[in-house]
Image: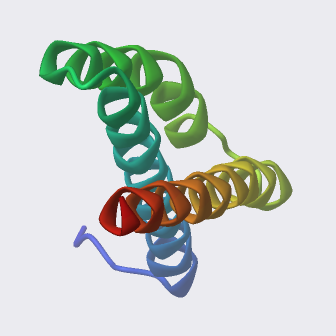
Amino acid sequence: MQDVISKELVVNTLQILGVGILVVGGIGIVSMRVGFINKSIPATLITALILSAIYGNTAINTTGTLSGLIIGGIGLIATVSVMAELVKRVNKMEVE
């Protein structure tokens, strides 16, 4: 019997990949913010590891479409808000 790639398998894989991309991007941006504020590379790395262990594993292990979208949406909202704050801080630093 041959293995067959079904439409459902491809859609499920793309969904998991999309959620994973949102989660990894969010973890990176939030970790960068923590390190930027504390001016500490170790704080950035520790934050990334903690967020990966908790948020990353939760997001990747979701099985439903709705739960995946909710978790990905939370990451997207956190990323956008953190990026907006970082832009303001960097602009403020450039003016000074």
Please identify the residue farthest to the front as the structure is shown: 96
Q: How many marks?
A: 0
**On the rendered image, what quadrant is the N terminus found in?**
bottom left
Percent x, y of residue 6: 46, 81
What residue occupies the far left of the structure in this picture? 41
Residue 58 image-quadrant placement: top right
Q: Nearer the viewer, residue 4 or 47?
A: 47
Task: Indicate the position of residue 84 as horizontal and vertical percent values.
Answer: 60, 65
In the depicted structure, whether residue 31 falls above or below residue 15: above
Q: Quadrant of residue 39?
A: top left
- Left or right: where 29 falls relative to 59: left
Rendered location of residue 53, percent (x, y): 41, 17
| Residue for point 48% across, 27% down | 57
**Which residue is at 40% across, 14% downward?**
50
Task: Find residue 51 and report its horizontal and vertical position in percent.
Answer: 45, 24
Between residues 87 and 78, which one lies in front from this camera angle?
Answer: 87
Colour scheme employed for the rendering of this structure? rainbow
Position of residue 64 relative to residue 40, above or below, is below
The residue at 49%/69% (across/down) is 18
At 33% from the left edge and 78% from the top edge, which residue is drawn? 4
73 and 31: which one is in front?
31
Q: Quadrant of the C terminus?
A: bottom left
